[in-house]
Amino acid sequence: MPRDSGEGAGARWRSPASHAFGQHIGLILAAAILLVAIIIFSVMFVIQQHRLPGNFEITSTVNNTMPLALAAIGQTIVVLTRGIDLSVGGVIDLTNALAAILLRPNLGNQLAVSVIIILIGAAGGLINGLLVGLGRLQPIVVTLATLSIYQGLAIRVLPQPGGAVPPGYTGFLVNPNAPTALVFLLIAIVLWLGLRRTRLGVDIFAIGADEQAAIALGVRTVRTKIIAYTLAGALYAIAGLFLAATATAGDATTGDSYTLTSIVAIVLGGVSFFGGRGSAIGAIAGAFIITMIVNILFFAKINPLYQAFYEGLFLVIAVVLGALIGRLVRARR
């Protein structure tokens, strides 16, 4: 009997740690995959360049990841409510095009234009939220339709690639001389942690975990979904600003790829498509994983015609292994 009691006490003592590990397994796996990708890239870089990656490589990686990381955070907020947003690319197309033609060198213009563009992105997300929340339409259908609408508007705004982003604006958002854009990611993480502890954050997770139970507990699900999609739209617009700053010009089609990659990033980051489980921090890690994969393929001298194939293959393997390991860990809790 004492032995049994001791074992029971030991099991109870391990339970909190085991529970916490199971809850954050997605984030842990994302960090592990990112670490492996960084090591592989560094080894390949040293072999070819005979030195470790320096400031230029780190800065380029961070700056190129920023738009995807921000888009992935927005996608995370939506997916946590058990939804999905396919309009990501359209909003980024539109806001990127607007930034290229509206931004001017003076600070007042840049502040005003940035706020207006973010509000336009939020308005696009609000439309999605109203159709999904009030209209009770399927998110995949709604956002696929608005994707086409926003892409059409972007082409109308900027029929041909062009425009220009002032150097000062580019230097502020994506400084080419240092990875200062990490400050914006740190701010995003702090804001996410703050949101997670608010009533809105709790409601978002509650809806994704069990919407009917959330309703029974008094959660205003329609309002929460509308706010979630609106926040996501604002984040896509910010991603569009960073994309324009990185390219120093506009292109009404350059954001199209972010619809798929934002989804891949959150999956790699451990966000569950069944809602209620995941973190924006994991989504950021997933975005960096995607960038590192692209870098690895480049240094592996993969024919550009086949890069998409190898990139997709690697991502499928990573996602499948992550899901299997996560299930095994949760099954042993």
Image (cartoon, rainbow, N blue to C red):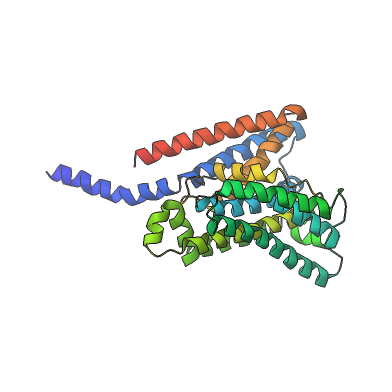
Decide if residue 136 is on the left or right side of residue 293.
Answer: left
Q: Furthest-front residue in view?
A: 135
Residue 42: horizontal and vertical position, in percent? 67, 37
Q: Is residue 182 positioned above or below 51 on the image? A: below
Q: Furthest-left residue in view?
A: 1
Residue 8: horizontal and vertical position, in percent? 21, 46
Residue 227: horizontal and vertical position, in percent? 56, 63
Q: Residue at x 46, y 52 (%)?
A: 208
Q: Residue at x 17, y 46 (%)?
A: 5
Q: Residue at x 43, y 54 (%)?
A: 211
Decide if residue 20 is on the left or right side of residue 131.
Answer: left
Q: Residue at x 80, y 67 (%)?
A: 110
Q: Quadrant of the N terminus?
A: top left
**So how many labels did they put on this image?**
0
Q: Is residue 29 positioned above or below 117 on the image? A: above
Residue 74: horizontal and vertical position, in percent? 61, 54
Q: Quadrant of the C terminus?
A: top left
Q: Is any atom of residue 220 visible in this view?
A: yes
Q: Is any atom of residue 198 visible in this view?
A: no
Q: Front-most of 36 and 191?
A: 191
